Amino acid sequence: MIDTPHGPARAHIHDAEGEARAALMLGHGAGGGFKGGDLQTVTAVARELGYVVAHVEQPYLVAGRRSAAPAHQLDAAWLAVVEHLREHELAGLPLVAGGRSSGARVACRTAAAAGAIAVLCLAFPVHPPGKPEKSRLDELDGVEVPVLVIQGESDPFGMPPPAAGREIVAQPGTHALTGDLAGLGDAVRGWLGRVLD
């Protein structure tokens, strides 16, 4: 448990297999939890590559609330967890920030403040379903380090365009990213390896 300005957050630390070379912090989607196949696949792949992986539960989830907190609260809580982990469990390790859906947005918005060397986005919600005019692309465009976005080809939240420093991998399926977990793992494995190189 880690104190934040908006209540306690919880971090689950998954040690690297072998010597730790870097850290990967992952945030959950608005509905919460880390049981999804995409997050489990990313965690396993990262640990194989020498990443210590931290699953970060936002304070609203720890408190048992179902509706996500406002963006500024999510960001402040995330950065408080980053600060704590960089002083303790993740000390001295280069940090890749990431998450799924809402967690990916938090990782993008806070990448600079967190000192992240790269950002991993699973199912980045480009816009609310059916409302392309309410774009959140500025959050992705604002990231100044390498970004990997893995997106379902039929995601109702949209498909972000590639850009300088931003790699897009389209997967079969929707926002759940369950269509090709092996392919997802391969894409993440190659990218995370390049990040460290």
Image (cartoon, rainbow, N blue to C red):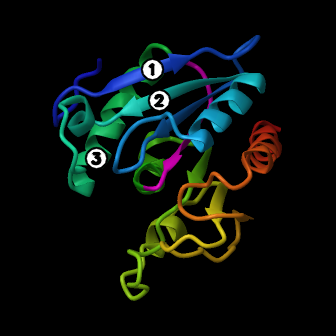
Give the answer, above or below, for where 183 lies relative to 77.
below
Return the x and y of residue 128 as percentages of the image width and height.
38, 74
Distance between mark 2 and mark 1 Cα atoms: 5 Å
Question: Which residue shows up at 42% across the image and 75% down it?
Answer: 127
Question: Residue 55, labelled with which disc?
Answer: 2
> Could you tell me which secondary element the residue under label 3 belongs to?
helix
Q: Name the N-terminal-most of marks 2 and 3.
A: 2
Q: Name the N-terminal-most of marks 2 and 1.
A: 1
Taking the image as shown, residue 21 lies to the left or right of residue 122, namely: right
Taking the image as shown, residue 132 lies to the left or right of residue 167, namely: left
What's the residue type where badge 2 is placed? His
**Magenta region, residue range:** 90-101
Give the answer, above or below, for where 53 lies relative to 154.
above
Q: Mark 3: few, some, or many residues within 10 Å (few <14, many ≥20)?
A: many
Q: In which quarter of the image is residue 52?
A: top right
Return the x and y of residue 174 as percentages of the image width and height.
58, 65
Question: Residue 12, labelled with which disc?
Answer: 1
Which residue is situated farthest in the bottom direction here? 133
What's the residue type where badge 3 is placed? Leu
Question: Residue 74, labelled with which disc?
Answer: 3
Foreground mark, 1 or 3, reads 1
Question: Residue 57, labelled with which disc?
Answer: none
* Camera sees residue 96: no
Question: Which residue shows up at 23% across the image and 34% down it?
Answer: 59
- Viewer-closest of 28 and 176: 176
Q: Mark 2: few, some, or many residues within 10 Å (few <14, many ≥20)?
A: many
